Image (cartoon, rainbow, N blue to C red):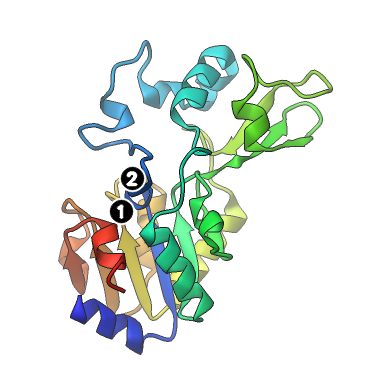
Amino acid sequence: MNHLKEIINKSKSVVFFGGAGVSTESGIPDFRSKDGLYNQQYKYPPEEILSHTFFINHTAEFYEFYKAKMNSLKYEPNITHIKLAELEQKGILKAIVTQNIDGLHQEAGSKNVLELHGSVHRNYCMKCGKFYDAEYVFNSVGIPKCICGGIIKPDVVLYEESLNEDILEEAIYQISKCDTLIVGGTSLTVYPASGLIRYYNGNNLILINKDATSFDNVANLVIKDNLGNIFKNI
């Protein structure tokens, strides 16, 4: 902790790159742990359900899973979200790059949040483009429909879909120019998000994760712990 605090205090620009482990302490399940979504039994594998092809061909079953498992509206930001927002307010943290789609960083007060995989809070009609919020989608019965009759699609990046180029470019820019990159709560196995770490040019690469990652050997500081245990002391 002392080493981490020392690095942060000496940094002029910090970027935080986070994954599902940031939100698990709010109660949102992750994907790949032993109790994660991908290790639970469903009629179809979750990776298949959360694909573009499945959404188009089995829209009703997609939404059955999506509403049951991806609804983050009942969850609150935890200490990690709150402390990151405080660091941004102090001018230390310049950006958050997240793989999460729950919107909890913004709810905690963070402003510059780059959502690589989109957000459940943005939903659009596939026919006319009209915007709908998360409450409309999660409270709908069956397939959520627009007033024009079109099917509404969440603005989340499904398997087989590309990341938003503008967000990806901004994430690369922020990571490449920061003094300190803190990577937390991610296994760093999902590409292309995991490849972003390679754009970091500084000497303060910090990895905070319960389990080992493939980048531990190149990090300047590795902490194997829950993020909440770390950030409550910052």
Image position, residue 234 (x, y; %): 31, 74
Q: Earlier in the sequence, mark 1 or mark 2?
A: 2
Q: Residue furthest top?
A: 43
Q: Is residue 3 above or below residue 81?
A: below
Q: Residue furthest right?
A: 148
Instruction: Please indicate whether residue 60 sits to the left or right of residue 208 in the image.
Output: right
Quadrant where the N terminus sits is bottom left
Residue at screen point 45% across, 21% down: 49
What type is the residue that disc 2 sits on?
Answer: Thr
Circles 1 and 2 in contact, beta carbons < 8 Å: yes
Residue 39, by quadrant, is: top left
Q: Residues within 10 Å of mark 2 (few under 14, many from 20)?
A: some
Q: Secondary structure at mark 1?
A: loop
Distance from the alpha carbon under mark 1 to that under mark 2? 9 Å
Residue at screen point 55% across, 55% down: 107
Q: Secondary structure at mark 2?
A: helix
Q: Which mark is residue 24?
A: 2
Image position, residue 216 (x, y; %): 18, 62
**In this orientation, which residue lies closer to the viewer: 107 or 63?**
107
